[in-house]
């Protein structure tokens, strides 16, 4: 006989990129500088992007769209991006 307490289940694993837990958040460069020096950032990272035939502005736009970042400032061939977690953490 069948037991009514038994439930069918399927085990599965979802691989989600960390960007799924980020959301864009506008921020001006002064507030960003204050946040960077405050020590309260949840995470910060630095990456070097290899040269490409795509212009810098296009590459930054692609990165920001892919990782849900807002450009805070851009100086020459460097840019700072910002996002907060879906829980509102900086």
Image: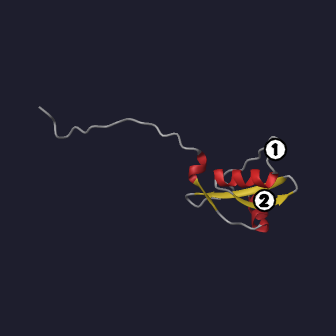
Q: Identify the residue under disc 2.
A: 37
Tell me: residue 42, above or below residue 29: above
- In this view, which residue lies farthest toward the top? 1
Specify whether 84 is left or right of 1. Answer: right
Specify whether 6 is left or right of 61. Answer: left
Residue 8 x/y as whole percent: 27, 37
The residue shown at (52%, 39%) is 15
- In this view, which residue lies farthest toward the right? 76
State which quadrant residue 11 falls in: top left
Number of labels in the image equals 2
The residue shown at (68%, 66%) is 26
Q: How is the image coloured?
A: secondary structure
Residue 53 marker? 1
Specify whether 90 is left or right of 75. Answer: left
Q: Residues within 10 Å of mark 1 (few under 14, many from 20)?
A: few
Residue 10 marker? none
Circles 1, 2 touching at the beta carbon (< 8 Å): no
State which quadrant residue 25 falls in: bottom right
Disc 2, SS: helix
- Quadrant where the N terminus sits is top left
Residue 3 x/y as whole percent: 16, 36
Please name which of the two marks, 1 or 2, marks the residue nearer to the observer.
1
Q: Is residue 85 visible?
A: yes
Tell me: residue 55, above or below residue 4: below
Find the distance from the CA under tag 1 to the CA under tag 2: 35 Å
Residue 2 x/y as whole percent: 14, 34
The residue shown at (73%, 47%) is 45
Q: Is residue 40 visible?
A: no
Mark earlier in primary sequence (1, 2)? 2
Residue 66 x/y as whole percent: 64, 50
The residue shown at (79%, 47%) is 54
Disc 1, SS: loop
């Amino acid at each position: 006989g069948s037991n009514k307490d038994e439930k069918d289940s399927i085990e599965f694993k979802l691989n989600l990129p960390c960007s799924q837990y980020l959301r864009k958040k506008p921020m001006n460069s002064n507030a960003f500088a204050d946040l960077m020096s405050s020590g309260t950032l949840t995470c910060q990272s630095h990456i070097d992007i290899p040269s490409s035939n795509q212009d810098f502005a296009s590459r930054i736009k692609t990165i920001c769209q892919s990782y849900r970042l807002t450009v805070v400032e851009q100086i020459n061939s460097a840019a700072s991006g910002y996002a907060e977690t879906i829980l509102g953490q900086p």
